[in-house]
Image (cartoon, helix red, strand yellow):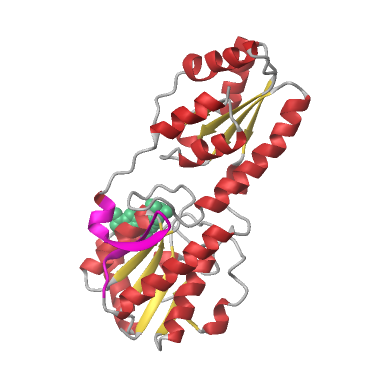
Amino acid sequence: MKKIAVLTSGGDAPGMNAAVRAVVRTACENGLEVYGVIRGYNGLINGDFIKMDLRSVSDIINRGGTILYSARCKEFATEDGMRRAIRTCQEWGIEGVVVIGGDGSFRGARDLSERGIPCVGIPGTIDNDIACCDYTIGYDTCLNTIMELVDRIRDTTESHDRCSVIEVMGRHAGYLALNSGIACGATAILIPEVPFDIEKHVIERMKKTQRANKKHFIILAAEGVGVDVKALAAEIEAKTGVESRATVLGHTQRGGYPTAKDRIMATRMGNYAVKLLMQDIGNRVVACQKEEVLDYDIFEALNMQKSIDMNLYNVAHEVSI
Ligand code: ADP
């Protein structure tokens, strides 16, 4: 393979730039021509390509977001959109594509591979919800950002003997809430994997810790639990008498400069992805398990199931008392 493309798709994640940089530099160093595709699969359909060289990716390893922009592209999931994307790749002579994104983006990569354009996926999502990986690019940065933001909220929560109910990202997965809850010493952690019961998971826990002289409380809720944190704060105040405030961290969690871990893993995975394409190997997902980089068949990867570590959930609650 001599000409490849790289795109970022779905929700952006800090560290995607480090992965793009590694893809471009590895390709250039090994004599491949490499194109950046703008706005994910939209760019692949419309031929929105930029020829990349060693210097096109200077000064991006430290930047959040993605210089290639990201998008959700409904058209790509249709037969017509897919046909147009393949035609564009053929016209430009693109022989393989590196797709940096989440599960949805990998489904697109699988469909493209099936139709003759070999793709390699790199897991880039803050949610850490890709089954074949125990870590995804952006997760570590996001976790640390949440920790810093909750620490700030904790200062004022403590000063006023309040309860803070904080919503963090995670529409389908509770990894961010669980691990940031541990890192921040949350009294209660609400995750989508555990059916929510306000009495059992919040009120009883708060009352127990109150009996042990605790006077301020952090309650962390993943957005996927589906609770309105403002309403939850009001209910907590009514039931416990503790003044309660709600905060939705929102998009502050997505940006910012990536942590060392995200930069290093993104660099290793970007390099690995190009090495696969150089051997004409496509239809793979690059994965990270126990700090090692490896790869899976995309079909296999998409069919794997990931479950939350309930031992960790129990540890969190045993310690935050
Ligand atoms: P993520 O990659 O973060 O999971 P999405 O689920 O939004 O984000 O998927 C990103 C893009 O991948 C979609 O906008 C679409 O273009 C493409 N995609 C998602 N699902 C499919 C599918 N089943 N078939 C083909 N393309 C898909």
**Picture residue at 21% right of the left edge, 70% below the top:** 115
- In this orientation, does residue 1 appear? yes
Residue 34 on image: x %, y %: 43, 81
**Picture residue at 36% right of the left edge, 84% below the top:** 3
Q: Is residue 52 above or below residue 64?
A: below
Determine which quarter of the picture holds residue 192.
top left
State left or right for residue 215 relative to residue 310: right
**Picture residue at 40% right of the left edge, 28% below the top:** 194
In the rendered image, residue 237 lying in the magenta stretch gets the answer no
- Decide which of 12, 211 is in the foreground and name it: 211
- Decide which of 292, 257 is in the foreground and name it: 292
Determine which quarter of the picture holds residue 159.
top right
Residue 199 on image: x %, y %: 50, 14
State left or right for residue 308 relative to residue 302: right
State left or right for residue 155 relative to residue 126: right
**Picture residue at 65% right of the left edge, 37% below the top:** 150
Q: Is residue 211 above or below residue 53?
A: above
- In this orientation, does residue 69 appear? no
For the C terminus, give its image quadrant: top right
Determine the quadrant in which ligand 1 lies: bottom left
Q: Which residues are magenta?
A: 281-302
Most extreme residue toward the bottom is 31
